[in-house]
C-alpha cells in the first residue's frame, strides 16, 4: 500500500480469525491484515503485519462499519454498514450478491457456541430490523441468505447475543429491558430492566450464560433467566459502553470515564484500572482482549503467573498505529 493510498480514518470496530485481523473504520472501509507473532532474541513478543486487501462499503456515503464478524467455519466476513448487511469472502474480501438485501437493521448476531459453529447444519444469522418489534432468522448457504422465521418482541432490539437456541435481546424504548428468546421453541421471557440513560449491551460469557448491563451493575444470567453469581457494581461515574468476560474477570470499558476496569468475578471487586482516553472499541476476540483508540489498537494480555502476587493484572501492549504516519514502534501490529 503506497503512502498516498493509506486511508486517513479512525477505527470503529475489529474482528479476528486465526492470524487474520479485519479493521472496520468510521468511513466504511475494511482493511484485512495477515498477522505474525514472533519472539525476539530477548524473549519479547514482536507483532508483524501485512496488508492483504481492503474494500470500501456503502458507496459514497462512507458510513461507519457498525459491526464486523469473521465466520471461520464458513470462510465468510459479515459487516453491517448504514443498516445494510454485507457478506464477503474472508480471504479475498470479494463482495457476494446474497440474493436479497437485508437492510434497515439495528444489529445482528451469530451463534457463538463453538459446537454449533462447527456443526454440519446450516449457518444462521439473527438480525434486528429498525423500528420493528421483531427479530428475524436467516440461514446462509454458500453465498446466499434465506429467510427462515420471524420472532415477535415487545420493542425493537438494540443489542443481542446468541448461545445455542437462546438469544438474549436488549430492547429499546423508555422501559428498556432484556429478554431471552428460545428460537427453537419460540417462547420468550423477561430477565431484568436497565436504567434509563445507560448503554444496554449483551455478551455471551460461555455455554448457557450471558453478561448484561443494568446501568449501575453488570448482571450475569443463564439461558433460563437465573443469575448464579452476585452482580458486579461498576462504580461511581463509570457508565460502561462495553464489557466482556475473560475467566475469571469481567473487563469493562467506559468511554465517558476514559478508563478500563478489571473486576474479579469471584469477589466482584475492581482489581485494576487502566486509563484509556479517546477509546473507540473493546472486545474479546478469539480468546484475546482487544481495545482501540482513534488511531491505535491494543492487546490486553495477562501477565505470567510467576509475576502475579494476589491477583492477575492486565498490561497493555501497543499494537498498531491506524493512521497515515508510519513510525517504527515496539510491538508494531498493523499500520494504515
Image (tube, rainbow, N blue to C red):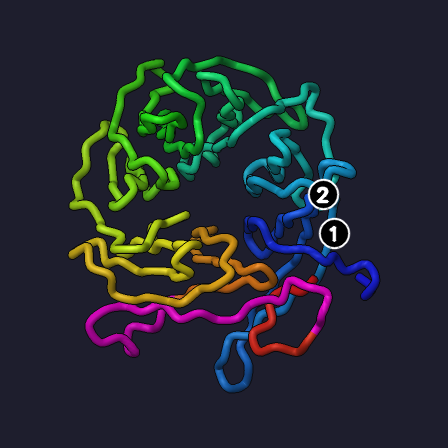
Q: Is residue 170 magenta-colored?
A: no
In this rendering, does residue 203 appear at all? no
- Nearer to the camera, 312 or 268: 268
- The image quarter in which residue 166 lies: top left
Q: Distance between the residues labelled 1 and 2?
A: 7 Å
Labels 1 and 2: the sequence-earlier one? 1
Q: Which mark is residue 93?
A: 2
- Nearer to the camera, 83 or 14: 83
- For the residues labelled 1 and 2, say whether their Cβ atoms are less than 8 Å apart: yes
- The image quarter in which residue 252 lies: bottom left
Q: What element carries label 1?
A: strand
Image quadrant containing the C terminus: bottom right
Residue receiving disc 1: 53
- The image quarter in which residue 185 lies: top left
In this rendering, does residue 47 appear at all? yes
Residue at 44 percent of width and 16 percent of height: 133
Residue at 27 percent of width and 31 percent of height: 193
Q: Is residue 312 magenta-colored?
A: yes
Q: Which mark is residue 275?
A: none
Residue at 53 percent of width and 71 percent of height: 318
Residue at 23 percent of width and 58 percent of height: 264
Over which residues does the magenta segment extend? 302-326
Amino acid at each position: 500500500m503506497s503512502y498516498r493510498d493509506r486511508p486517513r480514518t479512525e477505527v470503529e470496530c475489529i474482528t479476528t480469525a486465526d492470524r487474520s485481523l479485519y479493521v472496520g473504520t468510521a468511513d466504511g472501509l475494511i482493511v484485512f491484515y495477515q498477522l505474525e507473532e514472533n519472539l525476539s532474541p530477548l524473549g519479547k513478543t514482536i507483532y508483524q503485519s501485512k496488508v492483504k486487501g481492503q474494500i470500501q462499503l456503502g458507496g459514497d456515503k462512507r458510513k461507519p462499519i457498525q459491526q464486523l464478524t469473521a465466520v471461520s467455519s464458513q470462510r465468510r466476513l459479515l459487516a453491517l454498514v448504514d443498516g445494510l448487511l454485507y457478506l464477503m469472502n474472508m480471504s479475498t474480501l470479494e463482495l457476494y450478491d446474497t440474493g436479497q438485501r437485508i437492510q434497515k437493521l439495528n444489529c445482528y448476531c451469530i451463534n457463538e457456541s463453538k459446537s454449533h459453529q462447527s456443526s454440519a447444519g446450516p449457518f444462521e444469522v439473527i438480525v434486528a430490523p429498525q423500528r420493528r418489534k421483531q427479530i428475524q432468522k436467516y440461514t446462509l448457504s454458500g453465498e446466499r441468505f434465506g429467510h427462515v422465521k420471524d420472532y415477535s418482541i415487545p420493542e425493537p432490539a438494540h443489542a443481542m447475543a446468541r448461545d445455542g437456541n437462546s438469544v438474549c435481546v436488549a430492547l429499546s424504548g423508555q422501559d428498556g429491558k432484556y429478554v431471552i428468546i428460545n428460537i427453537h421453541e419460540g417462547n420468550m421471557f423477561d430477565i431484568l430492566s436497565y436504567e434509563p440513560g445507560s448503554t444496554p449491551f449483551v455478551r455471551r460469557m460461555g455455554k448457557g450464560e450471558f453478561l448484561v448491563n443494568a446501568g449501575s451493575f453488570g448482571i450475569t444470567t443463564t439461558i433460563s433467566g437465573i443469575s448464579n453469581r452476585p452482580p458486579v457494581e461498576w462504580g461511581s461515574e463509570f457508565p460502561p459502553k462495553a464489557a466482556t468476560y475473560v475467566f475469571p474477570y469481567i473487563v469493562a470499558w467506559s468511554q465517558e470515564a476514559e478508563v478500563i476496569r478489571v473486576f474479579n468475578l469471584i469477589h466482584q471487586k475492581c482489581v485494576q484500572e487502566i486509563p484509556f482516553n479517546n477509546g473507540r472499541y473493546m472486545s474479546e476476540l478469539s480468546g484475546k482482549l482487544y481495545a482501540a483508540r482513534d488511531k491505535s489498537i491494543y492487546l490486553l494480555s495477562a501477565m505470567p503467573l510467576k509475576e502475579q502476587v494476589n491477583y492477575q493484572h492486565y498490561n497493555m501492549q501497543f499494537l498498531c498505529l491506524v493512521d497515515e504516519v508510519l513510525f517504527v514502534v515496539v510491538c508494531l501490529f498493523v499500520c494504515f
